[in-house]
Amino acid sequence: MGSLNFNQNAWYRVNVTRQSGQSLAGTPLYLDNDTKGSVSFKDTNSTVVGESWQFYIYNATTMTYVLRCLDSGPHSYLATTSLNDGEVGADATTGHTTPIVAKYPVADESIFWQIEPWGDGSYYLYNLLNGSDWRLNVESTSDMDMDSNITAPQTGQQFTFQEMGPINNYDFSTYYPYPTSTATASSSATPPTTHSPSPSPGLSTAATAGISIAATVLAISVLGLLSCWFFRRRRRRHLPGLSGGGGGNSSTTKEDNNRWAMAGYSDGTASEMPGSFGTRAELMSSQAKPVELASGSYSPASQA
């Protein structure tokens, strides 16, 4: 095919220049709790479901794809993983990285592929995780790796695609990112950064407003009580004759009682007259008695 125009509802066979008569084949998931499978180049066989691949467009602007194999299922994708020392392909040229099919989360960028032309009708593939300097490669043994030797010509990196037939399967009609909580992602994947909110110190706005309102109500109540107290005190000072506890003017009440006592009245409670006045008996005894004269007559004595 001269230009890329994949039909998302079609299966494709993937061939490579280096291995004539072979096609890219994926397996069912059988590793790491059935979350991973292997990929390699096998002899082309139209009855092998592992040779059927879907190119699902993930981002039409950047022309980024996810690749799915019929034998691996709709929830797994062509991805890459790191190799341990001693494993096949674990050398400096490959960067210890090999392609697999896996249930990887969307956080693992190894599942996102870009396809670029060589200019001769064939294409090379690289993923977003490893970058364009590392390309999907087929070795002479039909094993696969990610190769940094990208100077043309590279027959192990020259891929062509052949449409095989319609998919017509709802499970392959959309993209299913595998849940992050159960996926076993590549060790080189970068997980999304999460941020924990920091608690803000001090009282909340609502608590501060409540305290302000309570203080205002308390101040108003105190002012009201003081106003009532001053009003009652002022009223008692201007109403003579009122007695009793509670802050009445005692000097005013005593003066009023003295006036009534001088007039010969009593309020029925006092036994003695206040001030310098004595009882009626004392007033009478303070007057001088008549003094008899030698001549047998008398005259009133002068008051001392």
Image (cartoon, rainbow, N blue to C red):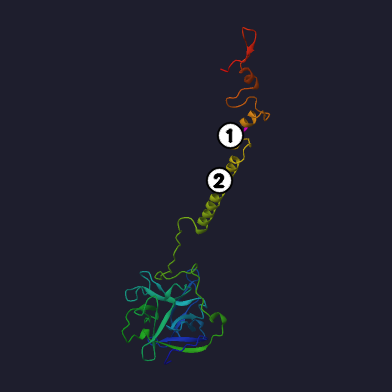
As displayed, is residue 276 above or below residue 234?
Answer: above
Q: Quadrant of the N terminus?
A: bottom left
From which residue to which does the magenta span run? 249-256
As displayed, is residue 255 above or below residue 68?
Answer: above
Q: Amino acid at mark 1?
A: Ser
Nearer to the camera, 88 or 110: 110
Q: What is the tally of numbered marks visible in this picture? A: 2
- Left or right: residue 232 versus residue 116 is right
Nearer to the camera, 56 or 287: 287
Q: Which residue is mark 1?
A: 250
Q: Amino acid at mark 2?
A: Leu
Nearer to the camera, 259 or 39: 259
Which residue does the image show at 51% across and 87% down from the upper left? 10
Badge 1: few (under 14), some or many (20 or more) residues near its Cα, within 10 Å?
A: some
Which one is in front in this view, the residue at disc 2 or the one at disc 1? 1
Which one is earlier in the sequence, the residue at label 2 or at label 1? Answer: 2
Locate residue 14: give its quadrant: bottom left
Residue lying at the far front in this picture: please name it. Answer: 295
Q: Secondary structure at mark 1?
A: helix
Nearer to the camera, 259 or 31: 259
Which residue does the image show at 50% across and 59% down from the upper left? 205
